[in-house]
Image: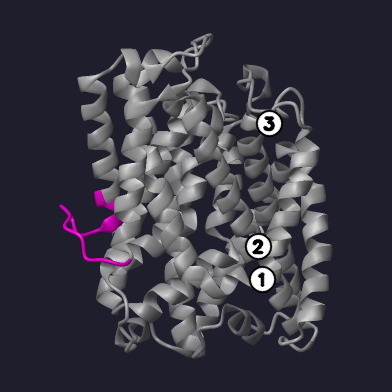
């Protein structure tokens, strides 16, 4: 890790900051990742094209709003997301949330390793049903990815800067080949098996990026310009992610396959397809472990960051060994349910409730009870909505959960802004 930012305890200093496009390149890497292509295929395969477009628009706006708010706070304060969560929820409240953040990122590590091993097996002509070979590939790749993480944000930034143009070229190439195989109208003429609602579609879109949007301060804190936080969110979520979702859906129709690996191979790229998957998964998983390590370091400041990264990498490999990719849509829905209320609470706290708590030298409370209660209520509502038809204002679960948590936090803070509701750390 690059000192002095190997733990969660210090803000980024001005001399360590870079221009915002370099920061945005790291975030854009997530939008141009293979999981986003998979989400686009799943979205248009599960909804009618009209509902898919509506869900995509709502999801893009929602993510840009959340990412813009969180990214702006990171750029302005120089603090990573876990420091911000600690300020908003208190040390005790943040301990639980940061653990969930870390576990979710470990899950993403496993998803990407699953995609990585499946790609390797397919390119080299191996048996995709051979669990031993897949496990060996995932173990070797996982160790290499964790090794990259040990060099810190600077290494991840350099790899992302090199790789984003490659992934953009890949997306353009995929779109060009799809044009040659089917007209654009084929996307709207395809008859999807409608098995999900618009709300489900929004959950899919938000779920694939929501962790990145909430932890955006981890990278926007390195932005020299404050506007870089908002610009990063806009270009990553509103522009890049929407483009990737559409390209993936169109390619699936044009190539007649819903398997992104089959589509990549059908492009005739040969070994270049392998390189694209390797590079994309490598950078993305390095960023996942980097951010997960920051989350755990909040609660275990005495433990070496490198040790934490290695342990988290091992957990991520276990997730891959148990094929977490087989539960991809469920995984995305749970992530949306758990974490979207966090963004509303942090943003409200920074801009309206306790802005002084984020200034340099401000005391961190032990427990901000109204914030914790609001988060539990919002997350519970969203999780229950996955199984039951609950009433809501917008009928979009992600938005209703965000509104509920934000409203409850505002009410709780007005009723009892000080005293027993917020326990000061002595």
Rendered view: 77 above or below 196: above
Q: Would residue 290 appear left or right of 25 to someone viewing this image?
A: right
- The image quarter in which residue 290 lies: top right
Q: CA distance from mark 2 to mark 3?
A: 23 Å
Color encoding of the figure: one colour
* Kind of element beneath mark 3: loop
Q: Position of residue 87 (x, y in %)?
A: 47, 23
Query: Which of the image's four quarters has the N terminus?
Result: top right
- Among the two numbered marks 2 and 1 on one chain, the one whose residue lies closer to the N terminus: 2
Q: Secondary structure at mark 1?
A: loop
Foreground: 22 or 384?
Answer: 384
Picture coordinates of residue 41, whole percent (x, y): 46, 76
Report whether 194 appears left or right of 153. left
**Which segment is the magenta one?**
387-400
Number of the front mark, 2 or 1:
1
Q: Badge 3 is on which residue? A: 300
What mark, if any, has residue 322 been given in the picture? 1
Can residue 227 be seen here? The reply is no
Question: For the image shown, how many numbered marks are present on the structure?
Answer: 3
């Amino acid at each position: 890790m690059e000192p002095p930012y190997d733990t969660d305890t210090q803000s980024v200093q001005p001399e360590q900051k870079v221009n915002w496009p370099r920061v945005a390149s790291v975030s854009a890497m997530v939008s141009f990742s293979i999981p986003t292509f998979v989400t686009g295929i799943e979205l248009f395969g599960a909804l009618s094209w009209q509902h898919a477009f509506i869900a995509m628009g709502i999801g893009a706006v929602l993510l840009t709003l959340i990412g813009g708010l969180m990214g702006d706070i990171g750029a302005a304060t120089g603090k990573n997301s876990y420091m911000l969560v600690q300020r908003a929820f208190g040390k005790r409240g943040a301990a639980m949330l940061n653990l969930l953040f870390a576990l979710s990122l470990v899950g993403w590590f496993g998803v990407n390793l699953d995609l990585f091993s499946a790609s390797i097996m397919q390119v080299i002509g191996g048996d995709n049903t051979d669990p031993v070979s897949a496990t060996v590939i995932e173990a070797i790749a996982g160790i290499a990815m964790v090794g990259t993480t040990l060099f810190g944000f600077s290494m991840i930034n350099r790899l992302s800067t090199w790789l984003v143009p490659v992934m953009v070229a890949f997306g353009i190439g995929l779109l060009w080949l799809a044009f040659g195989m089917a007209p654009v109208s084929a996307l709207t003429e395809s008859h999807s098996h409608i098995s999900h609602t618009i709300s489900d579609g929004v959950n899919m879109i938000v779920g694939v990026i929501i962790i990145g949007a909430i932890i955006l301060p981890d990278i926007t804190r390195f932005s020299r310009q404050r506007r870089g936080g908002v610009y990063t969110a806009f270009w990553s979520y509103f522009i890049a992610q929407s483009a990737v979702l559409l390209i993936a859906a169109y390619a699936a129709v044009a190539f007649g396959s819903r398997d992104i690996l089959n589509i990549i191979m059908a492009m005739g790229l040969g070994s270049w397809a392998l390189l694209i998957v390797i590079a994309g998964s490598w950078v993305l998983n390095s960023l996942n472990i980097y951010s997960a390590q920051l989350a755990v370091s909040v609660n275990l400041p005495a433990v070496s960051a490198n040790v934490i990264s290695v342990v988290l990498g091992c957990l991520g490999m276990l997730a891959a060994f148990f094929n977490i990719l087989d539960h991809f849509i469920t995984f995305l829905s749970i992530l949306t349910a758990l974490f979207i209320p966090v963004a509303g609470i942090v943003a409200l706290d920074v801009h309206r409730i306790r802005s002084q708590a984020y200034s340099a030298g401000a005391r961190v409370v032990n427990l901000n009870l109204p914030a914790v209660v609001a988060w539990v209520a919002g997350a519970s509502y969203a999780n229950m909505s996955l199984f039951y038809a609950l009433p809501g204002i917008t009928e979009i679960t992600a938005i209703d959960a965000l509104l509920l948590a934000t409203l409850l936090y505002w009410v709780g803070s007005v009723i009892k802004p000080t005293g027993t509701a917020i326990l000061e750390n002595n």
